[in-house]
C-alpha cells in the first residue's frame, strides 16, 4: 500500500498557544495522516533546528512520516494564537520558513525518473511568496502528476488574482462551501443554491471546472457532509456526515478529509466510495483535540479499510 506516490508541498508550522506549541499547517497535517494510514508521502517544506521544529519532528515520528525531503531553515514557522472573548484569532506573520522553499532542493527530492505518476497535494498559503511559488512550479514541471488542491484560503495568503492564476490543470479541487462561494464570486459566476442532490447540474460548477481544469470538485458542507462534482458541472456523489458523540474541536477536520480522500485516490479507489470515507474520517477528527490524534490506534480501522478495498480491486 505504501508504494503510492504522493508529494505534499507547503507549510509546516506550530500554532503558538499560551500553554505551548501545537503542530499545524494543512500540508503537514495531511502528510502525517497519509503516513499513519500506511502511505509514504514526501513532504516538501522547511523546518528549523529549534524547539518548534522539534515539536513537528516529534509529531512526524509518531505518525511514521519521513522528513528526508524537508529543507533546513533558521527558524520554524509559527502562527500566533490570541485567545479573545472565548475564541481564537490566528496571526500569521510574513517571511516564514515556508515562504522560502527552494526550487532546486525540491526538485532533487522528487521520485526517480521512470517512477509511476504521482499525486501532488498543495494549498495556497505557502504560495504567497515568489520563492515557494517557483518551487511548486518546478516540482509540477519535473514529473507527470495529478494535482490535489485544497484552497484552504487565509487572509495572510496570496491575493485572489494570484490564487486564480495558480489554479491551473487541477485534477481534484477541494473547497469548503464558504470557499466555493468566495471562488465563484472572484470568477464573477452565479452562486450555488446550497447542498446539491445527485445528478444536479449547475453552469457555475461547469465554468469553474473549465477555468481550473478540475476533473472533480469536492465541496465540504460541514455537518451536512460533502458533495463531489465532475468536470461537466454535475453532482456525481454525496456523503452525509455521521454523528459525532462529543465534539472536542473542528481544527484540522478539513485536513483529515483531504488526507483520507487523497489516500484512497492514490491507491486507485473509487471517488464516490472515498467521499464517504473522507467525511466519516473528518467527523471522527472532531472528537479529538487538535488536528492530529494522540493515539495512533485510531488509524488501524482505516488502514484495514484501505487495504480491504485494495484487495477487492486487485
Image (spheres, helix red, strand yellow):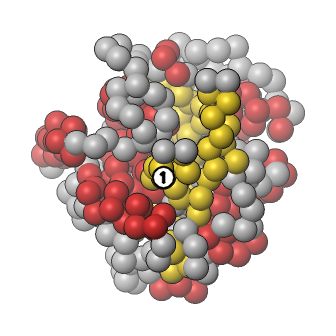
The residue under the point 53% across, 13% down is 197
Query: Is 294 placed left or right of 14 in the picture?
Result: left
Residue 309, quarter of picture: top left
Give the x, y percent position of residue 30: 42, 51
Q: Secondary structure at mark 1?
A: strand
The residue under the point 58% across, 73% down is 75
Q: Nearer the viewer, residue 293 or 218?
A: 293
Query: Is 160 placed left or right of 51 in the picture?
Result: right
Give the x, y percent position of residue 36: 26, 52
Q: Nearer the viewer, residue 206 or 292?
A: 292
Residue 158, quarter of picture: bottom right
Residue named by callout 1: 21
Asked if residue 143 shows in the view, the reply is: no
Give the x, y percent position of residue 37: 25, 49
The residue under the point 56% across, 79% down is 73
Asked if residue 55 shows in the view, the reply is: yes
Amino acid at each position: 500500500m505504501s508504494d503510492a506516490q504522493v508529494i505534499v508541498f507547503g507549510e509546516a508550522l506550530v500554532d503558538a498557544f499560551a500553554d505551548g506549541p501545537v503542530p499545524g499547517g494543512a500540508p503537514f497535517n495531511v502528510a502525517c495522516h497519509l503516513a499513519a494510514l500506511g502511505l509514504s508521502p514526501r513532504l516538501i517544506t522547511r523546518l528549523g533546528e529549534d524547539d518548534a521544529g522539534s515539536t513537528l519532528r516529534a509529531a512526524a515520528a509518531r505518525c511514521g512520516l519521513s522528513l528526508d525531503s524537508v529543507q533546513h531553515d533558521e527558524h520554524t514557522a509559527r502562527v500566533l494564537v490570541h485567545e479573545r472573548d472565548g475564541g481564537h484569532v490566528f496571526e500569521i506573520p510574513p517571511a516564514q520558513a515556508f515562504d522560502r522553499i527552494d526550487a532546486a532542493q525540491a526538485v532533487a527530492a522528487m521520485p526517480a525518473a521512470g517512477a509511476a505518476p504521482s499525486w501532488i497535494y498543495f494549498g495556497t498559503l505557502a504560495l504567497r511568496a515568489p520563492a515557494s511559488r517557483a518551487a511548486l512550479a518546478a516540482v509540477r514541471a519535473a514529473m507527470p502528476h495529478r494535482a490535489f488542491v485544497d484552497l484552504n484560503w487565509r487572509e495572510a495568503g496570496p491575493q485572489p488574482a494570484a490564487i486564480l492564476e495558480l489554479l491551473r490543470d487541477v485534477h481534484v479541487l477541494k473547497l469548503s462551501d464558504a470557499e466555493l462561494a468566495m471562488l465563484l464570486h472572484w470568477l464573477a459566476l452565479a452562486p450555488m443554491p446550497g447542498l446539491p442532490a445527485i445528478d444536479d447540474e449547475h453552469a457555475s460548477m461547469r465554468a469553474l471546472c473549465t477555468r481550473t481544469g478540475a476533473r472533480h470538485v469536492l465541496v465540504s458542507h460541514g455537518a451536512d457532509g460533502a458533495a463531489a462534482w465532475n468536470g461537466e458541472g454535475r453532482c456525481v456523489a454525496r456523503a452525509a456526515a455521521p454523528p459525532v458523540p462529543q465534539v472536542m474541536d473542528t481544527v484540522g477536520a478539513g485536513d483529515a478529509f483531504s488526507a483520507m480522500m487523497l489516500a484512497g485516490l492514490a491507491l486507485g479507489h473509487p471517488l464516490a466510495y472515498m467521499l464517504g470515507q473522507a467525511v466519516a474520517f473528518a467527523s471522527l477528527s472532531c472528537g479529538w483535540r487538535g488536528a492530529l490524534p494522540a493515539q495512533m490506534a485510531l488509524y488501524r480501522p482505516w488502514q484495514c479499510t484501505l487495504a480491504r478495498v485494495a484487495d477487492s480491486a486487485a
